[in-house]
Image (cartoon, grey):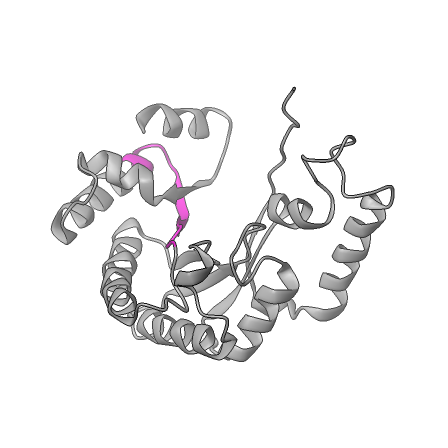
Amino acid sequence: MSHKLDMAQKYGFAGVEVFYEDLLDMASCDEPSAAAQLSAARSLRRMCEARGLGVACLQPFMHYGGETDRRAHRRRVEEFRVFVAVARELGTDLVVLPSSFLPAAQVTEDLGVIVEDLREVADIAAAQTPAVKVAYEALAWGTRVDTWEGSWEVVRRVGRDNFGICFDSFNLAGRVYADPASATGRTGDDAEEAVAASVRGILEEVDPAKVFAVQVADAERLGE
């Protein structure tokens, strides 16, 4: 982790995203206790501050929302409480929650249930002092939500001030532009126009105040 932070400092970054997996690595175990996670977060924050770096967000809180196993859902809610506490120890007020990509049998098709689950964690985050924001991100391979349009519908239905959207260029293009199974690597001859149309849709439909995070990432098609 030190090397990553050193490079962020070297190349003039003002802050970094913290991936939960990095935190687990610092805690030196796969399933650390809440106390171990909080201790690792405090150590990581000191490392960032020593380099003049802020923490933009903590991510990702994986595979939450619409679990058909409701006992598993309750466990995840309790894990989210720790996740939010870790974010606060890091000095950030933003966590990113991507759409679940658990197998279809493990995620309900009822969007209403997914929305209610997300309201639950939004309210937990809002109850913090100061309040923590939740940015919902559609993964291109999400089980029930895999487009920005789907994630925006969820955000609107959740209807919480601290619950907004995360746009990721990789996931947007992964739905409307890239197709690794095709000969060209693209969804079709109009793939570039599809991206342009998608971006126009974002500008026309999404309330800028609900855009909590924008991630810009690319990908290179692998060889045969």
Picture layout, residue 28 above or below residue 117: above
Q: Position of residue 118 (x, y in %)?
A: 41, 71
Q: Is residue 195 covered in magenta?
A: no
Quarter of the image where the C terminus is located: top right
Q: Quadrant of residue 147?
A: bottom right
Q: Is residue 212 left or right of residue 70?
A: right
Q: Position of residue 48 (x, y in %)?
A: 33, 37
Q: Is residue 220 left or right of residue 213?
A: right
Q: Is residue 49 left or right of residue 109?
A: left
Q: Relative to the observer, which residue lies in front, 111 or 13?
A: 111
Q: Position of residue 91 (x, y in %)?
A: 32, 52
Q: Is residue 55 covered in magenta?
A: yes
Q: Relative to the observer, which residue lies in front, 1 or 120?
A: 120
Please report the bounds of the magenta region as a residue range: 47-62
Quarter of the image where the N terminus is located: top left
Q: Relative to the observer, which residue lies in front, 4 or 34?
A: 34
**How many marks are shown on the rendered structure?**
0
Q: Position of residue 180 (x, y in %)?
A: 67, 35
Q: Quadrant of residue 76?
A: bottom left
Which residue is drawn at the image coordinates 23% and 64% (left, top)?
75
Q: Is residue 209 left or right of residue 25?
A: right
Picture layout, residue 181 above or below residue 177: above
Which residue in the rendered view is the most extreme toward the top?
224
Picture layout, residue 147 above or below residue 56: below
